[in-house]
Image (cartoon, rainbow, N blue to C red):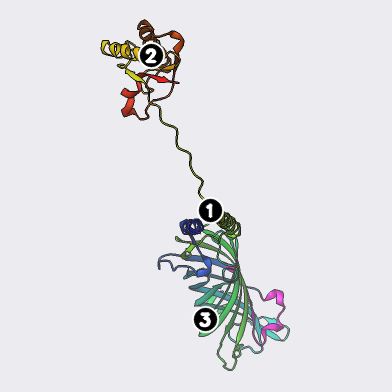
Amino acid sequence: MTLALACAAMLGSNAIAQEVTYVEDPAQGYTFNKFKSNWFITAEGGVNMQFSKHDVQREWSDRFAPAFGLQVGKWFSPIMGFRGGITYMGSKGVAKNATAFGLVYGENGQPEMYKDYYKTKVGNLGINFDAMLNVTNWWCGYKPNRVYNFIAYVGGAAYAGFEHKVGSDSKWDKHFDTNIALRGGIINSFNVSKQVALSLDIRYTCIGARQEAGYNYGALVNNASAFLGVTYLFNQRTWTAPIVPVCPPAENCDPIRARLAEVEARLADTQRKLDECLRRPMPTAAAPAPCVAPLATVYFPIGSATVSKTDANVLKSVAAQMKADTSVKYDVCGWADNYTGTEAINNRLRQNRANNVKNILVKNGVNASQLDVTTNPGDKFSGKENVYLDRCVTIQAK
């Protein structure tokens, strides 16, 4: 059970150690840039067509008039923006009477006729302000590298109307009035680079014109315009989403649970066997065999196989013991430490040490048949601090 708890603790620590990453999350919105960021300027030019009470009587192909504008704006977020600028809209139409504003005069100084109406031409120049909505970013999410954006806008404007004299004295004249207008439209924007975008702006403008006798305007004058534009985007142009932590997906722990269940089953089986073993009667142990110590041990200096005079006298006494019972055979085993010298040198030392001890024993009357010379390649005592005990020859009865 303890092992199972340890395994569970390890799994828990591994889960905690899994790395948490931090990424931008567009779902959390976008941070507002500094006020100096995300500005743009647009130059636009196109055509305008007016739909007042009588203008629709004129042939539609003869009602196109030039229009142009210059807009400066700022995006406050990837979705919401604002712009303001100057817009000019020309208009061509017809009037019912010869006192209408904006009559077109011929070279003969007389108003030009179209069927039963008098031709008119008016210019409207004003300032405008628009609130913009990037529908593409709103519906599809912001992408800095997106090529196409669909933008809708609504706003207001104030226009000054001018009469255009055509004939021997061709010029703009007679400021007519300043009128308030509502406008709205859609912009199809195509990014051709990180700084430049081309656009097609389809716009509807409703101007509240004066209602005075003799004028061609009713309470509302409708205009439809189409502009081709070029937009330059100033730095900074992109947006940054909030940084949020992302936790790794939860690991499937079923295989680990299965392994833990297997370990617990093995532990239970081991515990059962241990209990059975503890319930068994303890067998009577046989007396251990006595430990037979070496008859003698002769020690040597490092790298030497020469028996000292003192040890030679010891071996003389050992020989007397061996001759007392010639039926006993002895192992004369040579040792060397494994911490100094090479393997070949140490093997030679072992053999020479054992042979030199045997020769002294034989010289002192021991029968050579009682002596078996062997070597041991291991350490007699483990540890580098015991190397002095490893440089020896042991004499032990078999």
- Asked if one can make out residue 214 in the rendered structure from this viewpoint, the answer is yes
Label 1 environment density (alpha carbons within 10 Å; few <14, some 14–19, many ≥20):
few
Task: Give the CA separation, mark 1 to mark 3.
Answer: 93 Å
Q: Which residues are magenta?
A: 45-63
Q: Relative to 5, does residue 173 appear above or below in the rendering? A: below
Q: Which residue is mark 2?
A: 324
Say which quarter of the image contains residue 106: bottom right
Q: Residue at x 51, y 53 (%)?
A: 278
> Mark 2 or mark 1: which is in front?
2
The answer to whether residue 239 is visible is no
Label placed on residue 274: 1
Q: Is residue 72 above or below residue 255?
A: below
Q: CA distance from mark 2 to mark 1?
A: 54 Å
For the residue marked with disc 2, what is the amino acid?
Answer: Ala
Spot occupied by residue 33 in the image (x, y as percentages of width and height): 43, 66
Dot placed on the residue nearer the N-terminal end, 1 or 3: 3
In front of the other: 74 or 105: 74
Which comes sooner in the sequence, label 2 or label 3?
3
Local SS, label 3: strand
Amino acid bearing label 1: Leu
* x then y, percent, for residue 242: 46, 65
